[in-house]
Image (cartoon, grey):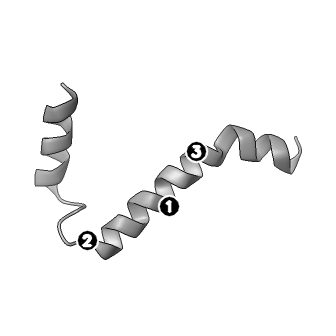
């Protein structure tokens, strides 16, 4: 596989992980059990 193939296949996942890491550092309470419960309730 070429670098382009990896970017196409895994680019969104890398972006998502990067955003989660950024907000975990920048926002207090982003990575908390209460936040996870709120997200799961919103999806259900």
Q: Which mark is residue 38?
A: none
Instruction: Please name the residue shown 81% across and 40% down the image.
Output: 5
- 7 w.r.t. 9: above or below: below
Circles 3, 2 touching at the beta carbon (< 8 Å): no
Rate crowding at label 2 as few (under 14), some (14 to 19) or many (20 or more) other CA atoms within 10 Å: few
Task: Give x and y (percent) for residue 19.
Answer: 44, 59
Q: Nearer the viewer, residue 22 or 33?
A: 22
Instruction: Please name the residue shown 18% across and 59% down the image.
Output: 32
Instruction: Please name the residue shown 10% across and 52% down the image.
Output: 34
Q: Which residue is mark 2?
A: 27
- Please indicate whether residue 37 sits to the left or right of residue 16 in the image: left
Q: For marks 1 and 3, give the CA distance.
A: 10 Å
Rate crowding at label 1 as few (under 14), some (14 to 19) or many (20 or more) other CA atoms within 10 Å: few
Disc 3, SS: helix
Disc 2, SS: loop
Q: Which residue is mark 1?
A: 18
- Please indicate whether residue 7 sits to the left or right of residue 15 in the image: right
Task: Give the mark, 1 or 3, whose residue is nearer the N terminus.
Answer: 3
Residue sitting farthest toward the right: 2
Task: Give the mark, 1 or 2, whose residue is nearer the N terminus.
Answer: 1
Q: For marks 3 and 2, give the CA distance.
A: 22 Å
Circles 1, 3 touching at the beta carbon (< 8 Å): no
Circles 1, 2 touching at the beta carbon (< 8 Å): no
Q: Which residue is mark 3?
A: 12
Residue sitting farthest toward the top: 44
- Please indicate whether residue 6 sits to the left or right of residue 12 in the image: right
Task: Give x and y (percent) for residue 10.
Answer: 65, 43
- 21 w.r.t. 11: above or below: below
* Location of the C terminus (image quadrant): top left
Q: For marks 1 and 2, give the CA distance.
A: 14 Å
Numbered circles on residues, count:
3
Q: Residue 8: which quarter of the image?
A: top right
């Amino acid at each position: 596989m070429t670098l382009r193939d990896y970017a196409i296949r895994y680019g969104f996942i890398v972006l998502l992980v990067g955003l989660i890491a950024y907000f975990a550092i920048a926002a207090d309470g982003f990575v908390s059990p209460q936040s996870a419960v709120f997200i799961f309730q919103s999806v259900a």
